Image: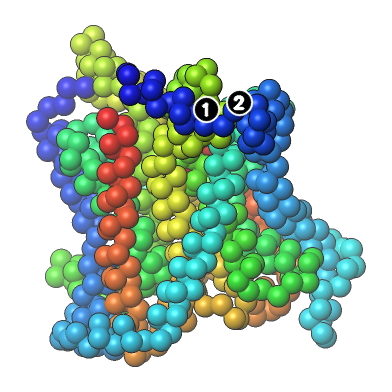
């Protein structure tokens, strides 16, 4: 105690109080909370608002423009052709349903795999094992996404690893296509789903679980009525990742999907090969709308604070 | 919660299986980096260290790693500044539109990558008439990296509370002194963990990157994408991937040590 009280005045009172510019600025800021808030908020809001929100609005606008079919230049001719095309064409309906199906499947698979391992990590493993498991889950995130997708290519290939493994018991790889894409995407996003569920489980107090079983609840009821309601925000936070990442992916689908078309591949081919940015913008409004509906639906659960 | 021995055994078995599922493809990459097959045929016909020797002198790979490191460092610095400022604003103040600001932070990571990518591509090229390059990649990456820093710092601020800071200013310290001597040491490890995640996120990002990189700048993921299907380059890509995993162990371990020692 003595050391603290003797050294603190030296540090703080090094300059005469009220004299230096730093000191005056400090007391000005201390008295004016609104100025402090404005200083803190201005840069991030400027960045996110100007870079991101403006870009999204611009995307919406571009969807109503058109492309000169000769020069490939974007023409500012307002029309709703792109949007009616995307809404009316059977191709886009099919691709939207397929992408949505993939996103839902990937999310269900990931949550199902994540729950038990997250539970073991949070509630059963000792401290040291828990740390080792967290590192084990985090590390694959540093292995390039592309390289992992490519590894799945050799796993799913004809005469590849899955055929080699399953061949003796009469099974075979699903090959490149929708199933392969779902498996690969579920693999790629798994750590993003495990981590928020683990964090949510860690916050559930052990005493609550003990109380529940002391009061005679079976393990299954404790999980169903105590644990699950408390970790729903964590599960939803994880599902936002797997859902959104699947909706927005086109590269893994290109690597293991064969000829499978997803919304992402359609957007990409319209930006690159077809050079029709307005149509690509119109298509990208589909996943944008889907995720906004999803976010609006889960906003009340508090999941967004768990991302 | 009382778990029977059987359910504990089942849960551990499932955990081991999940880890095997997570690491099996990575094991495939490790084996492929030693394979004598240039097209990574399975099972590997033989093993060699040829690719490991070649990878370290491969100019494209080394240049791409440098590019990615520069991009990731720059966007992480921006993310650290913006994310920390935001987390202080949202933790210390109540103001109109607070929940909207909160949503705004998560949006770049909650929206599908392809949407973010095409929106920024369209904004830079069509709206602003800019050339894609270093600047556009770093701006794009920083935008989705802010949330990782924000989350870590905000969670830390919520946990440590403000009583120590109040004590500090009661004892006469100004805002700067309090920040330097009281607040910063409390959030240091959260900044490290958030910055690390942000670096990793930027380093590996490919979807937004392909839309904002243009032709001039080749990050590591773009290098990998372009070389993955080339017969002589595929094993080198595998080597680079393994090296990256090995390098990552150190910072992840440090971050874990830091956060768990703070919890105690």
Tag 2 secondary structure: loop
- At a point 33% along the width and 75% down the height, the residue shown is B240
Q: Badge 1: few (under 14), some or many (20 or more) residues near its Cα, within 10 Å?
A: few
**Residue lying farthest to the left in this orientation:** B5
- Viewer-nearest residue: A50 or A221: A50
What's the distance in space between the residues labelled 2 and 1, CA to CA? 7 Å
Relative height, residue A296 to residue B208 (above, below): above
- Viewer-nearest residue: B148 or A272: B148
Mark carried by residue A239: none
Relative height, residue A35 to residue B205 (above, below): above
Picture coordinates of residue B12, whole percent (x, y): 16, 41
Which quarter of the figure has residue B118? bottom right
Q: Is residue B6 left or right of residue A272?
A: left
Q: Are marks 2 and 1 in contact (CB under 8 Å)?
A: yes
Picture coordinates of residue B21, whole percent (x, y): 25, 57
- At a point 59% along the width and 81% down the height, the residue shown is B216
Residue at the disc numbered 1: A13
- At a point 32% along the width and 18% down the height, the residue shown is A1
From this viewpoint, is residue A241 visible? yes
Q: Chain of mark 1?
A: A
Picture coordinates of residue A51, whole percent (x, y): 70, 55
Picture coordinates of residue B175, whole percent (x, y): 57, 30
- At a point 24% along the width and 60% down the height, the residue shown is B23
- Viewer-nearest residue: A211 or A55: A55
**Residue lying farthest to the right in this orientation:** A77
From this viewpoint, is residue A255 visible? no
Tag 1 secondary structure: loop
Relative height, residue A33 to residue A20 (above, below): above
**Residue lying farthest to the top in this orientation:** A215
Q: Is residue B254 left or right of residue A146?
A: left
Which quarter of the figure has residue B20? bottom left
Residue at the disc numbered 2: A17
């Amino acid at each position: 105690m003595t050391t603290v009280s003797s050294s603190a005045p030296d540090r703080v009172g090094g300059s005469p109080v009220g004299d230096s510019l730093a000191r005056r600025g400090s007391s000005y800021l201390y008295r004016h909370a609104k100025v402090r808030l404005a200083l803190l908020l201005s840069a991030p809001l400027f960045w996110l608002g100007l870079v991101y929100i403006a870009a999204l609005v611009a995307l919406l606008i571009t969807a109503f423009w058109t492309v000169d079919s000769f020069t490939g230049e974007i023409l500012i001719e307002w029309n709703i052709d792109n949007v009616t095309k995307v809404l009316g064409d059977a191709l886009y309906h099919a691709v939207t349903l397929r992408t949505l199906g993939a996103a839902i499947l990937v999310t269900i698979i990931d949550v199902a795999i994540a729950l038990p391992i997250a539970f073991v990590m949070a509630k059963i493993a000792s401290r040291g094992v828990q740390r080792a498991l967290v590192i084990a889950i985090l590390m694959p995130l540093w292995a390039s996404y592309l390289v992992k997708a490519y590894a799945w290519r050799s796993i799913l290939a004809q005469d590849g690893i899955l055929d080699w493994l399953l061949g003796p018991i009469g099974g075979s790889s699903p090959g490149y296509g929708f199933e392969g894409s779902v498996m690969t995407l579920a693999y790629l996003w798994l750590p993003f789903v495990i981590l928020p569920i683990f964090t949510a489980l860690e916050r559930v107090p052990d005493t609550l679980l003990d109380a529940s079983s002391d009061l005679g609840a079976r393990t299954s009821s404790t999980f169903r009525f105590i644990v699950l309601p408390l970790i729903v925000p964590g599960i939803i936070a994880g599902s936002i990742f797997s859902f959104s990442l699947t909706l927005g992916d086109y590269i893994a689908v290109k690597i293991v999907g064969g000829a499978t078309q997803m919304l992402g591949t359609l957007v990409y081919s319209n930006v690159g090969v077809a050079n029709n940015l307005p149509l690509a913008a119109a298509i990208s409004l589909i996943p944008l709308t889907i995720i906004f509906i999803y976010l609006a639906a889960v906003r009340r659960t508090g999941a967004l604070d768990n991302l | 919660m009382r778990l029977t021995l059987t359910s504990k055994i089942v849960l551990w078995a499932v955990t081991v299986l999940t880890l095997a599922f997570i690491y099996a493809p990575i094991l495939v990459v490790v084996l492929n980096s030693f394979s004598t097959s240039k097209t990574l045929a399975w099972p590997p016909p033989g093993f060699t260290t040829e690719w490991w020797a070649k990878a370290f002198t491969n100019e494209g790979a080394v240049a791409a790693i440098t590019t990615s490191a520069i991009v990731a460092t720059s966007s992480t610095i921006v993310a650290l500044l913006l994310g920390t400022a935001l987390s202080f604003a949202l933790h210390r103040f109540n103001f109109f539109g607070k929940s909207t600001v909160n949503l705004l932070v998560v949006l770049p990571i909650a929206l599908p990558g392809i949407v973010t990518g095409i929106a920024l591509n369209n904004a830079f090229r069509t709206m602003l008439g800019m050339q894609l390059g270093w600047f556009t990649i770093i701006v794009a990456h920083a935008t989705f990296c802010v949330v990782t820093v924000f989350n870590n710092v905000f969670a830390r601020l919520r946990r440590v509370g403000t009583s120590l800071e109040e004590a500090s200013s009661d004892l006469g310290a100004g805002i700067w002194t309090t920040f330097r001597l009281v607040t910063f040491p409390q959030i240091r490890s959260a900044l490290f963990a958030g910055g690390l995640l942000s670096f990793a996120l930027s380093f590996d990002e490919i979807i937004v990157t392909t839309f904002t990189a243009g032709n001039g700048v080749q990050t590591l993921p773009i290098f990998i994408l372009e070389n993955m299907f080339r017969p002589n380059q595929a094993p080198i890509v595998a080597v680079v991937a393994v090296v990256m995993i090995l390098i990552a162990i150190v910072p992840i371990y440090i971050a874990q040590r830091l956060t768990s020692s703070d919890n105690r």
